[in-house]
Amino acid sequence: MEKTVIPRHIGIIMDGNGRWAEIRGLPRVEGHKRGVQRVREIIMTAKGIGVEVLSLYAFSIENWMRPEDEVTVIMGLLESALKEEFLNFMKEGVRFKVIGNRDKLPENIRTLIESTEEATGHNNKLVTQFALSYGGRDEIIRAIKKAMELNLPPEEITEKLISSLLDTAGIQDPDLIIRTSGEQRLSNFLLWQSAYSEFYFTNTLWPDFTKEEFLEAIYEYQMRDRRFGKVKIGAIKCT
Ligand code: IPE
Ligand code: IPE
Ligand code: MG
């Protein structure tokens, strides 16, 4: 694959774990377990083809409203996956980062996240940004509060300033956002940052999302014509 047209930042809304399990007559937790395995494969593929940032929507701020046992299972899986993957992140040069409202996360997970972020902070092959307890609106509200604390005059409230106060500060906006499971919505993912992202929707459920389909999404992205509100160079004159 041509390096220059590889999306620099890809976001993935990893949806469909529950349905994957339900259609097999299994408890939803089995779908979440399978989902974790897919995450590993996609991180390695993204790194291999030269993607710079991978943002993975793993748990939304609205997901706290799920039944308590499901939330507990997801938090447990998260903890064990993070512990298991740590050495791999170090070996592969993957930087781990979390975006989202950390105050709502259990203390043990928060501590684990902080230590993993610190230990992997200098890894430079791929940034893997996990959206955990994440909501785009919540992130924007937190950014506005930070801006107000700075007591700035209105003319200093710019797009650049807001971007720098979001959890994604310093990270370029996503070029491509993929959502699995057939749903065609953002569900509060990267609202500000996705202003000019390309979207790829697939009916495949996340536990079935393979490396091949990931590459297919990138091929499709490569066919897109991104104009960012402008007209194409060489376009026919208006008048
Ligand atoms: C995505 O799968 C994982 C999380 C939201 C934590 P779901 O659990 O939403 O699966 P479906 O949409 O019910 O199939
Ligand atoms: C979005 O999926 C969040 C994640 C994939 C982590 P949901 O399953 O929670 O979203 P809705 O309810 O279908 O919009
Ligand atoms: Mg879902």
Image (spheres, rainbow, N blue to C red):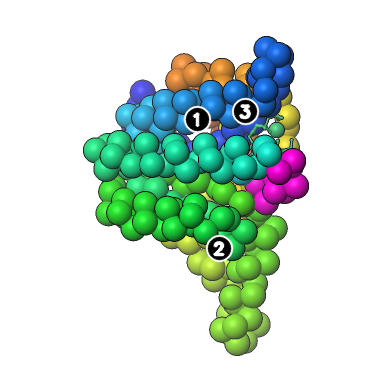
**Labels 3 and 2: the sequence-earlier one:** 3
- For this orientation, the residue located farthest to the left is 91
Identify the magenta region. Answer: 60-68
Q: Do the residues under discs 3 and 2 have CB atoms within 8 angstroms?
A: no
Report the quarter where the C terminus lies: top right
**Labels 3 and 1: the sequence-earlier one:** 3
User: Can the viewer see residue 217?
Assistant: no
Q: Which residue is mark 2?
A: 166
> Crowding near pointer 3: few (<14 within 10 Å), some, many (20+)?
some
Q: Is residue 45 left or right of residue 210?
A: left
Considering the whole magenta stretch, tell me its main secondary structure. Answer: helix
- Percent x, y for residue 146? 59, 75
Report the quarter where the N terminus lies: top left
Amino acid carrying mark 1 in the image: Val
Q: Can you tell which of label 3 and label 2 is closer to the viewer?
A: 3
Secondary element at image label 3: helix
- Percent x, y for residue 118? 34, 58
Amino acid carrying mark 3 in the image: Val
Q: CA distance from mark 3 to mark 1?
A: 11 Å
Q: Which residue is mark 3?
A: 29
**Labels 1 and 2: the sequence-earlier one:** 1
- Residue 145 position by quadrant: bottom right
User: Can the viewer see residue 65?
Assistant: yes
Relative to 124, say whether 34 is above or below: above
Amino acid carrying mark 2 in the image: Leu
- For this orientation, the residue located farthest to the top is 24
Q: Which residue is mark 1?
A: 36
- Residue 58 position by quadrant: top right
Relative to 156, say whether 181 is above or below: above
Query: What residue is drawn where x is 62% and y is 28%?
Result: 29
Q: Is mark 3 within 8 Å of ligand 1?
A: no
